[in-house]
Amino acid sequence: MFESWEELGEFVTMFTKAVAEAPFRRAKEETDFPFYSGPGCCGGPKVDHVVNGLLQVWKRQLEQIRQVNFAMAEAIAAAFPSPQLLYQAYSRLTSETERENLLVNIPSCSGAGRTFQAVRPYLSRQIYQQTTSYNPSLYLNYNP
């Protein structure tokens, strides 16, 4: 069946690998999201059943917004430890302008505490729109 012992060795290696990976592939196909391979995939923070790690996920979400650096995400997460608390703070305000400016002047320090930078109005407005908008086509990465 095989012309040489090298071909036989390649076949045995390929077959063994396929048998070893079969349970993982079946489990991956049974999930609702086949592209998602489990907690902590893609180097993200792990969230356990007691919800440890959600604060880290919230900070990472904030950092994905253009011009939000690590220190700024830390400062916003310190003021509002979850997206739900931020949303509740928005809902307590009466005017749209107050909501858009809620995060303005939250101080963040970077560079070992030497440089202080505050959240700018356009960035506060962008975070407000991202956390409250129902429009999936809303373009958020603008900078006036």
Image (cartoon, rainbow, N blue to C red):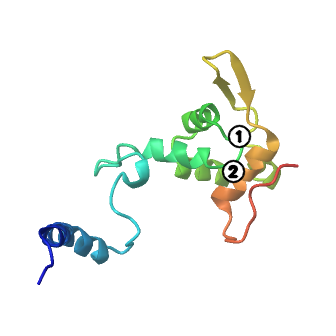
Residue at the right extreme of this rendering: 144
Picture disc at residue 103: 1
Q: Position of residue 117 (x, y in %)?
A: 73, 27
The residue at the point 67 percent across, 51 percent down is 90
Number of marks in the image?
Answer: 2
Q: Secondary structure at mark 2?
A: helix
Query: How busy is the neighbourhood of tag 1: few (under 14 within 10 Å), some, or many (20 plus)?
Result: many
Residue at the front extreme of this rendering: 3
Q: Could you say which quadrant of the image residue 138 lies in?
A: bottom right
Q: Position of residue 48 (x, y in %)?
A: 30, 49
Depth-wise, is mark 1 or mark 2 nearer the camera? 2
Q: Earlier in the sequence, mark 1 or mark 2?
A: 1
Q: Secondary structure at mark 1?
A: loop
The residue tagged 2 is 127
Q: Amino acid at mark 2?
A: Ile
Q: Are marks 1 and 2 in contact (CB under 8 Å)?
A: yes
Please tell me which residue lies in front, 4 or 38. Answer: 4
Q: Position of residue 32 (x, y in %)?
A: 36, 75
- Residue 21 vertical position relative to residue 96 in the rendered view, above or below: below
Residue at the bottom extreme of this rendering: 1
The residue at the point 20 percent across, 70 percent down is 14
Relative side of 107 to 80, left or right: right
Q: Could you say which quadrant of the image residue 73 lies in?
A: top right
Picture disc at residue 93: none
Query: How busy is the neighbourhood of tag 2: few (under 14 within 10 Å), some, or many (20 plus)?
Result: many
